[in-house]
Image: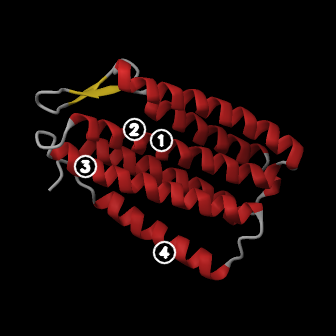
Amino acid sequence: MPAYNIDFELMGMGIVAVIILYFQLNYTMGSLKNKRFLHLCYSILTAQFFDILTAYTFTYASYVPAWINHTLDTLYFVATAFASAGFLAYILTYIFEDGRREKREDRVKAAYALYGIVLFMNYFTGHIFSFDRETGAYVHGPLYLIVYIIPAISVLYTLFLIIRHAGSFTKRQIGSAFFFVFTILLGTLLQSIFF
């Protein structure tokens, strides 16, 4: 068994898988909004998969080569970045017309490209995280919090846009967006406190 409780991630994967199935059976993929929503769901599902996988590989770190754990953890952080950027991209489709939306999307892509470069450079520097080659222990680098700060800023900015442009959304959509973010934050908080 992994060193920490993966129940929250397993439950989350099940819920997201049901949402994806329901969405694909009941909606067409012709609109940009629907495509973006599906992309968001698949990004979340991928991040959850890598979170569960790394829970196992980190638990057996003495048997798993450090480069495999490093790669899997990097893929987890990339998937998390795609999910947070996907949430923003999905919400932008409700707020802005093509030209104004694309300008904002270009800025988001540039910011995440820089983040991707920093993640890639981590292989050589260990400034974000690394693994002790002898014990396989996970080691936080001085920039470790960046893997949480970048997605958090994106999600908080997305919530700000939802509030600022509340007229572009129904009350159910606003409630769903806040519930979505609340469950992410609650899961992260519970995981860090109790597991």
* Badge count: 4
Circle 2 crowding by C-alpha within 10 Å: few under 14, some 14–19, many from 20: many
> Cα distance, mark 1 to mark 4?
23 Å
> Cα distance, mark 2 to mark 3?
13 Å
Q: Is residue 11 above or below residue 63?
A: below
- Determine which residue is flagged by label 2: 74
Q: Position of residue 7 (x, y in %)?
A: 28, 61
Q: Residue furthest bottom?
A: 25
- Determine which residue is flagged by label 1: 78
Dot 4: element: helix
- Left or right: residue 193 versus residue 187 is left
Q: Which label's residue is closer to the chain start, 1 or 3? A: 3
Quarter-of-image position of residue 120? top left
Dot 3: element: helix
> Cα distance, mark 4 to mark 3?
23 Å
Q: Which label's residue is closer to the chain start, 4 or 3? A: 4
Residue at point 58%, 56% (across, down) = 40
- Left or right: residue 114 versus residue 58 is right
- Determine which residue is flagged by label 4: 18
- Left or right: residue 79 versus residue 107 is left
Circle 1 crowding by C-alpha within 10 Å: few under 14, some 14–19, many from 20: many
Question: Depth check: 42 or 193 in front?
Answer: 42
Q: Which residue type carries mark 3?
A: Ala
Residue at point 36%, 44% (across, down) = 189
Q: Which label's residue is closer to the chain start, 2 or 3? A: 3
Q: Position of residue 24 (x, y in %)?
A: 61, 76
Q: Which residue type carries mark 1?
A: Val
Dot 2: element: helix
Which label sits on residue 99?
Answer: none
Circle 4 crowding by C-alpha within 10 Å: few under 14, some 14–19, many from 20: few
